[in-house]
Image (tube, helix red, strand yellow):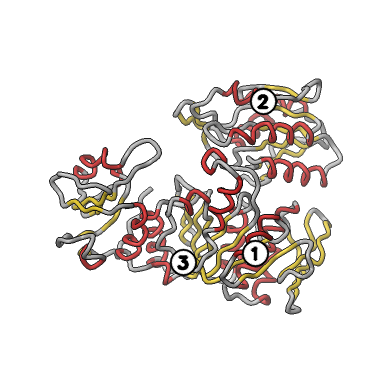
Amino acid sequence: MRIIPSSSMAKSLMEFDSKIFNQQVVISGVSINAQKVVPGDLFIAFAGANTHGISYLQQAISNGAVAVLSDKKIETSIPSFIHPNPREVVGSISAWLYGQPFKSLKAIGITGTNGKTTTANLVKQIWQLNSIKSGLIGTLGVEIADEKLESARTTPEADDLQAIAAAMVEQGCKNLAMEVSSHAIDQGRIKGAKYEVVAFSNLTQDHLDYHLSMENYFQAKANLFASEYAKGAVINIDDAYGKRLLKQVKIPVVTVSRKDLTADWYLAKAEIKNGMYQVEIKSKSGESLSENFALLGDYNLDNLLLAVAIVNSAGLSLDKIAPTISKLQSVPGRLESVNAGQKFTALVDYAHTPDAVERVIATVKSVTSGKIIGVLGCGGDRDASKRSVMGQALFNGCDLAIFTSDNPRSESAKAILNQMTAGIDLGKKGLVEIDRKNAIDLAVKNAQSGDVVLLMGKGHESGQEVNSVVTPFDDRIELAESIRRLAR
């Protein structure tokens, strides 16, 4: 996806920095991807995970690049400039070219292992319900007010991020809620962005294939909570890493908690009645709201608290927040119900970390008296150390645990399953079915009236990746079709 703001103007690179760009070159766009280059672009080339961007220079030139910035001198047909770390300046150059769009938006950045997607969506919904035209960037894609666009990453690369923000400003958006991944912070994708508020949900095991340790993972998240990026912060102090983050943050902080009554915002009550929560949220200053909230699960109470504190910190009064709570809706693939006329409950959830798997199973267990039949796989080419923990969470939490494939990518699906089931005596309670479609069928065949089939891992995703080939596969569609064929 390449969004190009229609109002972007051509500018001379010397206006940005005459030391880096020591000759007159006029550009109208910035791209780090040679395939996405359009005429008038500055192509910025740096080392990636596998190759250096300069390998694609000729493609960039063929597509219309008028200059190239890299970390070494290049003999080429277009002006070539040098910077020791080109990735560091992608965001600032893009922000300059597109008119500093983050200065025209009240932007919110949400980070954490779990809850980013739902919290960002709740924030946008609260704004929209108050007639504040808003944008959204995250796992489910990009939303410019009511227009929805696909995105390859939770947090786009810096060139795309600034262009998207500029397009939002063009379309009249006043606010922006976005998810900020640890990869994005570490790789400088948010350079050039400035947030009114940044928020921390929690930190649990994930992405250790990239960060190598929980300490590195935490520090990457913590780097967002600095004056370079934000004016203020909202932190969930029920999380141990949240408490640690609170002690080291130098910008103003608002705290939230379901348990700690000394937090700036805390949950005074949450009772389930008629399939939804009756919640009471209070602030240290004495404000309170009492409303119905339809999203079940302790983690959704965390998400709600965070969202309320975020929008209030960003300037929306509680009397405008309160009426929206009962209207808030879940997001696709998060405990999403599938109904094809069956007598049991069928749910699809994106849970793909040990903590998320445990939490979603616990939530389902709290609202059902029947069996829980869980289906779960683990993605390939990602943190392998979490696989056995996720397998144990599935097996311990469900009455019938079905282990299957997720997105194996370049790995062996069988090898992944062996890691998931290592040390587990499957007995009659655990089944292994490598084919995800067949695994879903197994779950449906074993479900009776009052039971719950819980399909985890892929959530909203519409494809399955095996050996670099993505084939259509949507858990919600597959589950509905299986129910129609096999449900008793």
Amino acid type, residue under disc 3 in the picture: Glu
Q: Nearer the viewer, residue 142 or 224?
A: 224
Q: Is residue 232 above or below residue 469?
A: below
| Residue 228: assigned label | 3
Q: Which residue does the numbered mark 1 point to in the structure image?
A: 246
Q: Looking at the picture, how far across and down is residue 145, in whole percent?
A: 48, 62
Q: Nearer the viewer, residue 1 or 419?
A: 419
Label 1 element class? helix
Amino acid type, residue under disc 1 in the picture: Leu
- The Cα atoms of the two marked residues, 3 and 2, are separated by 48 Å
Mark 3 or mark 2, which has the lower sequence index?
A: 3
Q: Is residue 341 above or below residue 125?
A: above
Q: Which residue does the numbered mark 2 point to in the structure image?
A: 439
Q: Nearer the viewer, residue 394 or 448?
A: 394
Q: Looking at the picture, how far across and down is residue 361, in whole percent?
A: 75, 41
Q: Looking at the picture, how far across and down is residue 232, in whole percent?
A: 56, 70
Left or right of 33 on screen, residue 64 = left
Please name the residue shown 31% across and 40% down the image.
52
Please name the residue shown 66% across and 37% down the image.
456
